[in-house]
Structure formats: C-alpha cells, structure tokens
Image: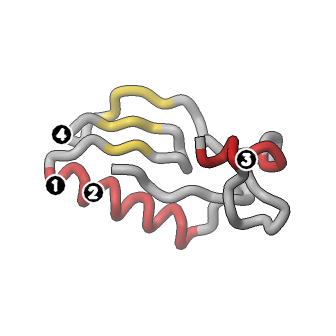
Amino acid sequence: MLGCWSPNGSPGASITNTDTTVRTAAAAAGYPFVSPVTGSVDDSAGALMVTHGPWITAGNTAAYVGADGVHPTDAGHV
C-alpha cells in the first residue's frame, strides 16, 4: 500500500496521522507499505525494511508538484 504525500514538503499532523493509519492497516492486512512522507518501506508484517527520506522536500517541490501547489507534475507522477 502507498501512504500519503505532502505536496509542500512539510506534512501537517493530519497527513502524518493518515499515513500512520494506512501503515497500520497495511500491516494488519499483511500488505507491504511505502510512505512518501517518511520514505520508509515496511514489509508485509509491518517491519521497517529501509528508509530513504521524504519523497517531497522543500528543495525538490518545484520538480514534483505543479504550479497549483497541489497536484503532481509528470515527474511527480513517475
């Protein structure tokens, strides 16, 4: 399962809480989980496998988030 993303690179509490909820649900259902917010990848048992850092940061927002500040660019979709 894929968690939330933060288009501004600075996720608020509602985004991090939802990401955590989806992570918990994925583990309960036996699905692997990837968090764009934290960059963590969990296996199907919910154990952390690797962390690469957040996908969207203040430094790369322009490359991955469209001019509207919400929707991903083509690169963001990739």
Secondary structure under badge 2? helix
Please tell me which of labels 3 and 4 falls first in the chain.
Answer: 4
Marking on residue 28? 1
Q: As drawn, is 43 to the left or to the right of 66? A: left
Q: Are marks 1 and 2 in contact (CB under 8 Å)?
A: yes
Say which residue label 3 marks. Answer: 64
Residue type, numbered disc 2: Thr
For residue 74, above or below residue 51: below
Please tell me which of labels 3 and 2 falls first in the chain.
Answer: 2
Q: How far across and down, in percent of the image, does residue 15 sit?
A: 54, 66
Q: As drawn, is 47 to the left or to the right of 54? A: left
Q: How dense is the environment of label 2, judged by Cα within 10 Å: few (below 14), some, or many (20 and up)?
A: some
Q: Residue at x 78, y 65 (%)?
A: 69
Residue type, numbered disc 3: Tyr
Can you tell which quarter of the image residue 29 is in?
Answer: bottom left
Of residues 4 and 66, the one nearer the viewer is: 66
Residue type, numbered disc 1: Ala
State the CA–CA distance, disc 3 to disc 1.
31 Å
Q: How dense is the environment of label 3, judged by Cα within 10 Å: few (below 14), some, or many (20 and up)?
A: many
